[in-house]
Image (spheres, rainbow, N blue to C red):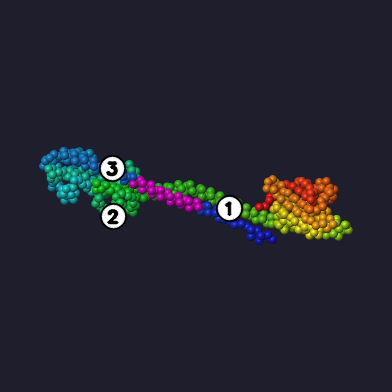
């Protein structure tokens, strides 16, 4: 097509850019979901850290209460044994929920009635108490086939000398109540460990006691900070990965722990992912459908716009062609008038009037503006043509303000200017009199009117445009009415004609 190149050249990239942005929306939704998942993982990990940190403080408080209360009861128990070590005799049920044992200075157990039983002289904890330690906590004793327990032992002194040991043996599942209250989930643990790495107790209770001094907790984390949280790739007891919180109870020579299975944190994380997917999936599908629908609308709009551009280009050319042909037809009419047998003055008047009409159409198709017309350029074209027919010694000057008019206003205004100037050339300067004709087009700052002022310094006139009977006078009056304007004439030192007319709302003064 003739206008296809024109259309392609002017086709904006806005539609393609908009489609590209719309395509980004379905991409952004998964990215947003990924960010939410990442935030969820961070929140889950942070919540898990907070839970185990709080849990280990609770475990520490319970362990401290257990140890200190047991030591106090052992002190009372030891006082009730009397002052003579030879007459020491244990009492049943002395400390609730414990098995109490008394040992003499040789490490032999003292039975009821004072008889001596099996000895513990080779046990390191007994020797530590014998060497002066005021109290000590044993590691976990027993295995899965027997009773598992640990002991809290206190040194007995009489008259400043070592008189034996009193020990409370406590079941290894003593932390079960704490574990239940914490509710850290399946696979969670709470534990109590001696500062040398020996396991005192743990719940769930392991099959046997172990020493973990070479594990990550003692080798890496405790030297750095007395408390904290870390991820264990595998427990030394059951090889299960856990999130572990620990705290050192230095005055008790203990370390307490609370841990939760990484499986629990992963389950919480995937639960959040599930909730996020449950919300995001329908939104994503809805956005995909909406984006597809919007893209289809944009493509249709773009196709319609291109069709309208082609039609507009065709119409523009047609309008140009119409005005060009009208102008050519008016030129032919002027040529025919010149060929007619008529007085030269009459033929000149007619050709000038038709020339003013032709100038409108020529200006329209040359400027490519059909709705509005630049009055300044159009009237300058008319006045240039008129200046060529000025009598000798007569000059034509003009000063035109920028003004846009509709073609329906420009044509009568141009013809009025043509009649005023032509009449001045004819009648104002008889017998070769020199002079000047001035045309001014003004647009006041306020109101919606334009003013055309024509002055000459000729001999004046005996007729006014309002009351005269000449053809030019009648044309000026009729054309002024067509513009909806008013004509005022004064004849002091020549002629001054002032035409005020309203300007259509679409015809604004250019900046």
Q: Residue 500 location, x and y as percent? A: 74, 47
Magenta region, main secondary structure:
helix
Residue at 29 percent across and 43 percent down: it is: 61
The residues tagged by marks 2 and 3 sit, at their Cα atoms, a distance apart of 26 Å
On whether residue 96 falls in the magenta region, the answer is: no
Locate residue 13: give its quadrant. Answer: bottom right
Which circle's residue, 2 or 3, is located before the other in the chain? 3
Instruction: Give the foreground label among 2 and 1.
Output: 2
Name the residue beneath numbered marker 3. 62
The secondary structure type at the circle numbered 1 is helix
From the viewer's perspective, is 314 left or right of 269?
A: right
In front: 425, or 483? 425
Image quarter in which the N terminus is found: bottom right
Label pair 2/3, CB-CB below 8 angstroms: no
Q: Residue 141 location, x and y as percent? A: 22, 48
On whether residue 42 falls in the magenta region, the answer is: yes
Residue at 48 percent across and 53 percent down: it is: 31
Classed neighbour count for the residue bearing mark 1: other residues with Cα under 10 Å, few (<14), some (14–19), many (≥20): some
The secondary structure type at the circle numbered 2 is helix
Residue 292 visible: yes
Name the residue beneath numbered marker 2. 219
Residue at 41 percent across and 50 percent down: it is: 41
In front: 28, or 91? 28
In the figure, 432 relative to 67: above or below?
A: below
Query: Residues in magenta?
Result: 28-53
Residue 146 visible: no
Locate residue 94: give its quadrant. Answer: top left
Name the residue beneath numbered marker 1. 295
The secondary structure type at the circle numbered 3 is helix
In front: 37, or 417? 417
In front: 333, or 478? 478
């Amino acid at each position: 097509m003739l206008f296809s190149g024109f259309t392609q050249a002017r086709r904006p990239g806005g539609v393609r850019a908009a489609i590209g942005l719309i395509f980004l929306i379905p991409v952004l939704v998964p990215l947003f979901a990924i960010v939410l998942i990442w935030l969820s993982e961070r929140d889950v990990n942070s919540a898990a850290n907070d839970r185990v940190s709080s849990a280990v403080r609770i475990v520490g408080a319970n362990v401290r209460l257990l140890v200190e209360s047991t030591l106090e009861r052992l002190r009372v128990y030891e006082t009730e044994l009397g002052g003579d070590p030879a007459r020491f005799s244990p009492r049943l049920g002395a400390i609730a929920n414990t098995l109490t044992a008394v040992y003499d200075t040789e490490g032999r157990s003292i039975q009821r009635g004072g008889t001596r039983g099996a000895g513990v002289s080779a046990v390191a904890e007994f020797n530590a108490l014998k060497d002066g330690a005021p109290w000590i906590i044993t590691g976990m004793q027993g295995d899965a086939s027997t009773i598992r327990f640990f002991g809290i032992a206190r040194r007995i002194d009489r008259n400043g000398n070592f008189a034996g040991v009193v020990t409370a043996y406590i079941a290894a599942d003593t932390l079960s109540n704490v574990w239940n209250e914490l509710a850290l989930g399946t696979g969670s643990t709470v534990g109590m460990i001696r500062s040398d790495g020996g396991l005192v107790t743990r719940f769930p209770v392991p099959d046997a006691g172990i020493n973990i001094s070479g594990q990550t907790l003692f080798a890496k984390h405790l030297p750095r900070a007395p408390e904290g949280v870390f991820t264990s790739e595998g427990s030394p007891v059951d090889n299960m990965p856990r999130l572990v919180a620990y705290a050192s109870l230095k005055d008790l020579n203990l370390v307490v722990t609370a841990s939760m299975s990484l499986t629990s944190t992963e389950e919480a994380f995937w639960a959040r992912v599930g909730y996020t997917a449950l919300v995001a999936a329908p939104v994503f599908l809805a956005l995909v459908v909406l984006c597809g629908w919007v893209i289809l609308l944009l493509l249709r709009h773009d196709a319609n716009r291109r069709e309208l551009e082609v039609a507009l280009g065709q119409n523009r050319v047609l309008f140009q062609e119409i005005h060009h042909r009208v102008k050519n037809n008016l030129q032919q009419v002027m040529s025919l008038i010149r060929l007619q047998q008529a007085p030269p003055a009459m033929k000149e008047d007619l050709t000038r009037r038709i020339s003013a009409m032709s100038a409108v159409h020529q200006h329209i198709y040359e400027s490519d503006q059909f709705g509005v017309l630049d009055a300044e350029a159009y009237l300058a074209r008319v006045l240039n043509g008129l200046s060529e027919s000025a009598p000798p010694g007569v000059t034509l000057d003009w000063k035109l303000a920028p003004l846009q008019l509709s073609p329906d206003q420009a044509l009568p205004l141009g013809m009025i200017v043509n009649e005023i100037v032509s009449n001045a050339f004819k009648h104002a300067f008889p017998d070769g009199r020199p002079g000047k004709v001035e045309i001014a087009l003004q647009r006041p700052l306020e109101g919606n009117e334009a003013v055309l002022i024509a002055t000459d310094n000729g001999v004046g006139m005996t007729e006014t445009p309002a009351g005269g009977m000449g053809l030019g006078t009648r044309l000026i009056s009729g054309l002024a009415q067509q513009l909806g304007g008013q004509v005022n004439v004064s004849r002091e030192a020549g002629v001054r004609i002032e035409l005020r007319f309203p300007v259509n709302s679409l015809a604004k003064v250019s900046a």
